[in-house]
Image: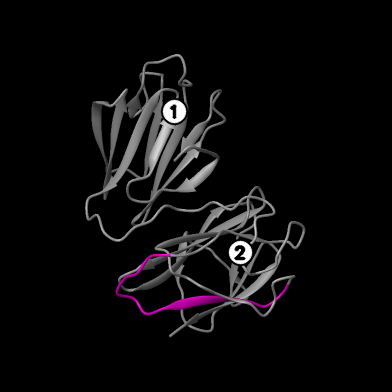
Amino acid sequence: MGKLVVSLDGVVIKEVQITKDKTTLGRRPYNDIVIDNLAVSGEHAVLQMVGNDVFIEDLNSTNGTYINGKAIKKQLLADNDTVEIGKYKIKFLLNDSGDYEKTMILKPGAALPGLGGSAGTGSSFGGLGGGGGTVGPAAIKVLTGAAAGREVALTKVVTTLGKPGVQVASITKRPTGYVFAHVEGAQRPSVNGIPLTGESIALRTGDLIELAGTQMQFVQG
């Protein structure tokens, strides 16, 4: 599935293959990945494998968990993401390294370039761009809120959207198509009026998504 390369000051300390559904990381000796350093909490973070996806979640650690320099609570890992815990850097590498880009967790109030959305509209989007792949082009058409009527191309391998702290989901571009997954929030997003029961669902053109109070439609081709 993937592996973690732990390094300190540029020196690789250990490599860990991700094989379990849950891999714990922390200072205590019972963790799957033990980092014996005072900057690391006893139970610092956990990695969860969901299908082919790997999420990392900070377990309310003292010094926090960072991905590519930004503090996170829970995030889907993309190939070559660098997790920072104290002075340690942990690089996430996919065995089948392909056309992956960094996941974007959306900041409250962030708007998609040209969308005209703003904080308080019930949904925030991160900027999209670049990418490529073998799957046909797809887009999300926003149906409600300040950005209603706008269409946004899904050009990244992983697009994360929603309202952090309320409801966050991701759309992942795979060789077989696009997959919609729940990332964060007590209430699950819905597809065609049905709340997501599993961790992810394959999207088909015309599917209606409701996320963080905003309705949107998935369009492919």
* Neighbour tally class for label 1: few under 14, some 14-19, many 20 plus, Cα within 10 Å: many
Type of the residue with mark 2? Leu
Q: Residue at x 50, y 76 (%)?
A: 139
Q: Nearer the viewer, residue 89 or 192?
A: 89
Q: Residue furthest front?
A: 114
Q: Nearer the viewer, residue 200 or 12?
A: 12
> Which of the marked residues, 2 or 1, is nearer the chain's N terminus?
1
Magenta extent? 130-144
From the image, tell me which residue sits under label 1: 85
Q: Secondary structure at mark 2?
A: loop
Q: Is residue 118 left or right of residue 137?
A: right
Q: Nearer the viewer, residue 193 or 26?
A: 26
Q: Measured along the vertical axis of the image, is residue 39 above or below residue 155? A: above
> How far from the left and from the top, in percent, is residue 142?
64, 75
From the image, tell me which residue sits under label 2: 112
> How far from the left and from the top, in percent, is residue 114?
63, 69
